[in-house]
Image (tube, helix red, strand yellow):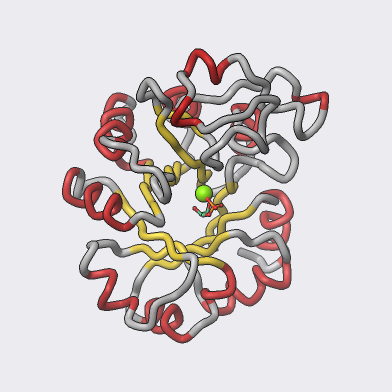
């Protein structure tokens, strides 16, 4: 079972910052996951929420702020003074870090609520600038966006995210098309997902921070987990001899 550091090493470092990604890059894990939004001036930035309120000393929607405005805020001190000074990273800064590693990078398009026109094209452009087509998985809860990625770049791996599970998921995934389902932890143990695994869908599960949960998922045969605690999960896998 592969391990992705969710939003970087987010249990110890401020999520989706260079500090969190650098820490993840030191670990013998399979990959990292990150979230992207578009700024007012159409720059791709790495942040989970639609607003900067929770993870910075500023406030407002990402879509209403320019990159220059966003850069003025501190994205580290909300977690601890030792992280003060972390800036919101651009996708390009994060790709520049990971293109020097063997880690896979799962870019989650956060077009779930706001429409970010051209986000798929822009992300794919960045990926190709870094020559990272084989190192990337693009996912979203917005399945129209996943569909566009599949059409625009059949050579780049994509995945459909699910907060809840649908009964006919195996048929549904053919319509996107995608071979990978990124599912929420409780849905991973439901029948449709077990069926999908049997039929060779790649199933990756978020967000898995408890050893007991990882144990269940290992037994089910999921391909990977997203975790805020990559070191804890590495230790678990080591104990299981994997
Ligand atoms: O991509 C997996 C997971 O990150 C999806 O949920 O809300 O943590 O982005 P969220
Ligand atoms: Mg995410």
Q: Residue furthest left?
A: 151
Which residue shows up at 57% across the image and 25% down it? 88
Q: Quadrant of the C terminus?
A: bottom right
Q: Residue furthest bottom?
A: 191
Residue 226, quarter of picture: bottom right
| Left or right: where 128 falls relative to 43 | left
Residue 87: x %, y % from top left? 61, 21
Residue 239 vertical position relative to residue 155 in the rendered view, above or below? below
Which residue shows up at 47% across the image and 18% down it? 67
Residue 8, quarter of picture: top right
Residue 55: x %, y % from top left? 66, 34
Residue 231 vertical position relative to residue 167 in the rendered view, above or below? above
Q: Quadrant of the N terminus?
A: bottom right
Name the foreground residue: 149 vs 62.
62
Residue 192 vertical position relative to residue 44 in the rendered view, above or below? below
| Left or right: where 233 falls relative to 186 | right
Residue 208: x %, y % from top left? 64, 62
Which residue shows up at 48% across the image and 23% down it? 65
Residue 239 vertical position relative to residue 101 in the rendered view, above or below? below
| Left or right: where 51 falls relative to 90 | right
Residue 7: x %, y % from top left? 58, 43
Name the foreground residue: 70 vs 100.
70
Which residue shows up at 25% across the image and 77% down it? 171
Name the foreground residue: 47 vs 185.
47
């Amino acid at each position: 079972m592969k391990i992705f550091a969710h939003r970087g090493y987010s249990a110890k470092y401020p999520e989706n910052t260079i500090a969190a990604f650098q820490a993840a890059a030191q670990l013998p894990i399979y990959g990292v996951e990150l979230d992207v939004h578009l700024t007012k001036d159409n720059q791709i930035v790495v942040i989970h929420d639609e607003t900067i309120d929770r993870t910075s000393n500023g406030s407002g929607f990402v879509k209403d702020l320019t990159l220059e405005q966003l850069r003025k805020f501190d994205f580290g001190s909300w977690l601890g003074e030792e992280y003060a000074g972390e800036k919101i990273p651009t996708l390009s800064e994060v790709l520049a870090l990971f293109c020097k590693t063997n880690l896979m990078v799962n870019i989650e398009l956060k077009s779930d609520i706001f429409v970010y026109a051209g986000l798929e094209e822009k992300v794919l452009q960045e990926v190709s600038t870094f020559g990272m087509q084989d190192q990337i998985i693009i996912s979203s809860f917005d399945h129209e966006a996943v569909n566009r990625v599949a059409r625009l770049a059949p050579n780049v791996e994509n995945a459909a995210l699910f907060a809840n599970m649908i009964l006919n998921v195996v048929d549904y995934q053919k319509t996107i098309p995608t071979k990978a389902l990124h599912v929420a932890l409780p849905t991973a143990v439901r029948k449709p997902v077990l069926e999908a695994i049997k039929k060779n869908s790649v199933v990756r599960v978020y967000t898995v921070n408890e050893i007991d949960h990882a144990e269940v998922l290992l037994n089910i045969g999921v391909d990977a987990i997203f975790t805020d605690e990559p070191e804890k999960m590495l230790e678990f896998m080591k104990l299981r001899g994997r």
